[in-house]
Amino acid sequence: MKNIIIFYASYGGGHLSAAKSIKQYLEENYSNIHLEMIDCMKYINKTVEKLTTGAYREMAKKAPKLWGRVYSGSEKGLLSKISKDSNKLMAHKLYKLLEEFNPDLVISTHPFSSQMVSYLKKKRKLNCKLVTIMTDFAMHKQWLIGHEYTEHFFVSNEAMKQDIIAYGVDGSKVHVTGIPMSHKFLEKFNSSKVYEDFKLNPDKKVILFFGGGEFGLGKDRTTAVLRAIIEKVPNYQIVAVAGKNVKMKESFEQLVFECRAENRVRVLGFTDKVPELMSIACSVVSKPGGLTTTESLASSIPMLIINPIPRSRRGKCRVFREKWGWYLA
């Protein structure tokens, strides 16, 4: 029996989704494992986790340029030092869990947990293998702190691999596998049933609009983007997904009422039917998060990218060029 821990953190949905996909695959394909999936920050301190993830979400929504500076600054200088020192301190709290669980393998989908585990390995408190799953399309140095104590890195594209090798990581450790996603995106769905389930017209094309994160524009401007699509492409149907953003969902519903577009616009809150919706969509409108980009690429759907966070788009644009020869930003 092998003990495996999958660590993630709730800064954006991609880290959690990747962790879930890995967990599902391992449980379906291996019987001799004991597996736990744990939010490393929530385990260390729920209050700190709530404050920091809340700050991340608000900055990403309302101050994307500020978040871009934080993202860039955390690669070097004072912010980078603060992050590294904080993770060293938090590693001691995480050690209690690791000591009790005694893992043979740790899989990390967030740089914080990778840093903590690599630090404990450096101090010879742990003797397990560490695997880091990088859930984006461009390298960030926070992922590579303690890389000497990481056995494997799994990355999304070849250019990213070369950047990591140039940074000084042993090339034999770096594997191009793509970002983990649900196997449902590789399934074939009955399109007629999907149209029927969502009360859509099978004779009209569908645009999938992900607006729950507000594109870093705020609720009103995000609603204005949706209004423009409704008015400018009257021959298309739109599925507007607000996720867990209740106020955004209410704003979408009010807009649909005002535009008298109930016959061709469907507003959804949180849904686990994204694979089905992507199977019938002709395009996706979204911010370029690592997971949504991966899912769109896997579904062969072009993306219209709205207001990408500064410093986060270079790798994704490169991937779009490799896939289609063009991109929108």
Image: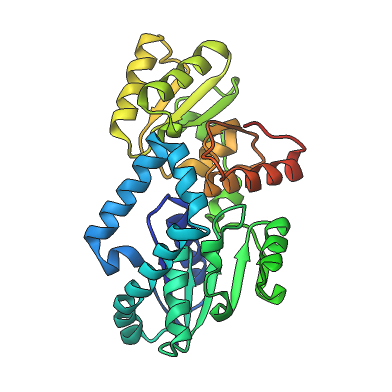
Q: What residue is rendered at 39% in x and 36% in y?
A: 61
Q: Position of residue 9 (x, y in %)?
A: 39, 60
Picture residue at 52% right of the left edge, 55% below the top? 182
Q: Decide which of 142, 150 is in the foreground and name it.
A: 142
Outermost residue on the left side: it is 47
The reply to whether residue 33 is in sight is yes
Residue shown at 49%/41% (left/top)? Answer: 274
The quarter of the rendered structure image containing the C terminus is top right
- The image quadrant of residue 302 is top right
Relative side of 45 to 111, left or right? left
Which colour style is shown? rainbow
Of the 4 image quadrants, the one containing the N terminus is bottom left
Using the rendered view, name the quadrant where residue 4 is placed.
bottom left
Q: Is residue 156 left or right of residue 269?
A: right
**Quadrant assignment, res 240:** top left
Percent coordinates x, y for residue 56 in the rendering: 37, 47
